[in-house]
Image: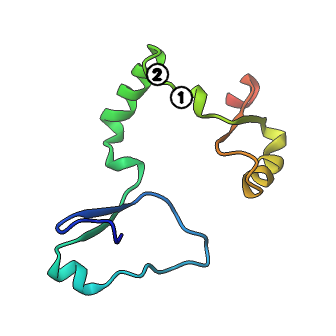
Amino acid sequence: YRATRKSGRTVVVGLTPQNTDWMKVPPADLVLLGKEVVGTLYGHVNPRVDFPYLLQLYRAGRLKLDELVTKTYRLEEINQGYADLLEGRVIRGVILFDEAARS
């Protein structure tokens, strides 16, 4: 936040640990310097428009998502997936469902 320029915006893009329920922001910065602090979920996209477009890019090979997955898990391995996440062994784990589970 201190690196935010005058009239600049700080965007909070992630959640903090559960026991953190506050942020330290000097009120004078907001009033006198015109700084803003805002939160975002999914980058403020319009899901009805943007998700189909992103899917189209992915299917065309123009949006690389598979490279972001560090490990995959079967549904019965979900507890291990959570344990790996909490221990910092994975960054992005994905649960794979078989065809029978989808119907």
Q: Label 1: few (<14), some or many (≥20) within 10 Å?
A: few
- Indicate the quadrant where residue 3 lies: bottom left
Helix, strand or loop status at disc 2: helix
* Image disc number at residue 13: none
* Image disc number at residue 65: 1
- Indicate the quadrant where residue 74 lies: top right
Q: Residue at x 78, y 50 (%)?
A: 84
Q: Residue at x 72, y 32 (%)?
A: 96
| Residue 13, x across and y down, in percent | 43, 57
Marks 2 & 1, CB-CB < 8 Å contact: yes
Determine whether, in the image, residue 21 is placed left or right of residue 81.
left
Amino acid type of the residue that numbered disc 1 sits on in the rendered structure: Leu
Placement of 2 over or under 90, stated as above or below: below
Placement of 12 over or under 63, stated as above or below: below
Residue pointed to by mark 2: 58
Q: Which of 83/90 is in front?
A: 90
Q: Which of 95/19 is in front?
A: 19
Placement of 86 over or under 65, stated as above or below: below
Count every numbered label the image shows and give the total: 2
Determine whether, in the image, residue 55 is placed left or right of residue 83.
left
Q: CA distance from mark 2 to mark 1?
A: 7 Å
| Residue 97, x across and y down, in percent | 72, 31
Amino acid type of the residue that numbered disc 2 sits on in the rendered structure: Tyr
Placement of 85 over or under 34, stated as above or below: above
- Indicate the quadrant where residue 35 lies: bottom left
Q: Label 2: few (<14), some or many (≥20) within 10 Å?
A: some
Name the quadrant of the C terminus.
top right
